[in-house]
Amino acid sequence: MSLDPGAAGPGQAVEGKEENRQHAKSNVHKRRKRRSRRRSPKKEAVSASEVVGSTANQPTDGKLAERGALSFDKQSLEQSASLSGKQKTMVHQPTVANATQRQRSHHEQRRHVTGPPRNIYSAIDLGTNNCRLLIARPTKGGFRVIDAFSRIVRLGEGVSNGNRLSDAAMERTIEALKVCADKISRRGVTCMRHVATEACRVADNSQEFIARVKEETGLNLDVISAKEEARLAVMGCQSLIAPGNRHALVFDIGGGSTELIWVRVLPGNKSEITGWMSIPWGVVNLSESYGTVGQTVSPENYAQMVSIVERHLKAFEDAHRVSEVVTRRQTQFLGTSGTVTTLASLHLKLPRYMREKVDGAWMKSRDIHALSRQVAEMTHLERSEQPCIGPERADLVVAGCAILEAILGMWNVPSLRVADRGIREGILRGMMQFDEPPQRHRNRRRGQGGRRQDKVKTNV
């Protein structure tokens, strides 16, 4: 009821005689008392349910949180135990059950919105020289590494002489694979692919070794072909092919072989392998063949190593006419191997190896030639004392430099890009390509009927 003198309308009090004003006041007071009596039972019921809900959602500053729905968990039960005596009596079993049901419904809706848990993937690249592991979780547009492992095992040591994996080499490798298996188990890997390359391709006793790995570590190793190895290497590092290039020569200097992959760049950041070759020379068997393991390399031996690799490169040039495309300056060279990353770290004068600075770095060809000759002329001890080489790579890096110089000498390219990625990354991308990218911030409130409420767009 309005007491505004300017108000008008039926049943409305206006200024007049004194008894009219007194009568109006009395009627207002009576109506307020009746409303209070009608509302009081309903108000008590609401407050009883709000005690549990509000204390369960109470912030640390003592102010009640403003939420559209109530939740209930173990923490709210503990908080309700500290309430006053009057409030404690309001926490009864039906209220707890209802709150627990609301919480269960909330979690079920969240699972429905966000989808199943993301898979965790692992990839092992067991090469002639190294055993490498990556464990990753897919993200939008790529993946995030959650664990990694790398160890020089020299599985192919002596294979070039007797065509068999030695007992010592197998023991070293299985010990490294046990570490990998432990990491895979602890990280809860759900999807995995583990491959072995050149050493297991050529060794006569490789199947015995694969069976032993399965028995002692539980890991399944897939011995892949040279063609599959080349494909995975390109998949792992194709994101480093700079825009504007129509072709790329990707090479991977391994322990027992060197893969050359001729790639045509397609629109949409895609690529196509138009040719490949596997040269049967890597840092391990080339070093063993020229007696440079643990020795200072003579200039004559170094020149012979460069020459023997060049003979294989000529066959690749005759098949694909790479030099003709290189002259148009729309070709990028991309090197993925321990040799290339080691030289890049030396070129950058890093105090220790730092992947974040090496991966994706550019080096001029003339700097690579000069640095390769400098490393080749070092004694074995001098190479061992280099922090980015170390004793494990000291007797193999010279053969890698010879292979790299042969590649750059065959095709006159001004620069080279370094990739600290390769087969492992290619394996992960291949497994993840069928996995949906994670959808973030999708747990939005829904309106009635399960329809998503319209989201208001704002300009920040």
Image (cartoon, grey):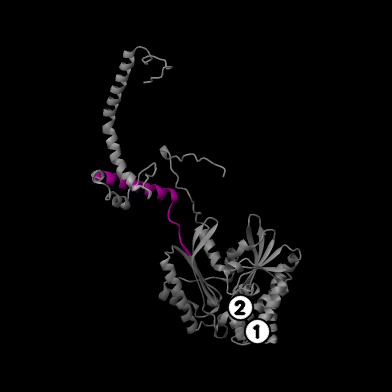
Asked if residue 119 is among those painted magenta in the image, a careful observer would answer yes
Indicate whether residue 299 is drawn in magenta: no
Q: Earlier in the sequence, mark 1 or mark 2?
A: 2
- The residue labelled by disc 2 is 282
**From this viewpoint, is residue 239 visible?**
yes
Image quadrant occupied by the N terminus: top left
Q: What x and y, as percent, mark residue 419?
A: 61, 68
Side (left or right) of 123 relative to 267: left
Front one among 41 and 295: 41
Quadrant assignment, res 363: bottom right
Along the line of sight, the residue nearer the viewer: 345 or 279: 345
User: Which quarter of the rendering shows the C terminus?
Assistant: top right
Residue 362 versus residue 299 in the image, above or below: above
Q: Which residue is mark 1?
A: 378
Residue 10: x %, y % from top left? 38, 14
The secondary structure type at the circle numbered 1 is loop
Which-is-in-front pick, marks 1 and 2? 1
Instruction: Name the residue furthest top.
Output: 17
Q: Is residue 290 left or right of residue 89?
A: right
| Residue at the (71%, 64%) spot, across then down | 331
Element on which disc 2 rests: loop
Using a 10 Å C-alpha cutoff, classify the residue at mark 1 as few (fewer than 14 neighbours), some (14 to 19) or many (20 or more). Answer: some
Residue at 32% over, 44% down: 53
Instruction: Please rate how many residues cluster around mark 2, counting C-alpha atoms within 10 Å: few if below 14, some from 14 to 19, many from 20.
Output: many
Identify the amino acid type marked 1. Answer: Met
| Residue 421 shows in this picture | no
Q: Amino acid at mark 2?
A: Gly
Residue at 30%, 37% in the rendered image: 46
Real-space Cα distance between discs 1 and 2?
Answer: 20 Å
Magenta-colored segment: predominant secondary structure: helix
Q: Position of residue 255 (x, y in %)?
A: 58, 77
Magenta segment = 93-121
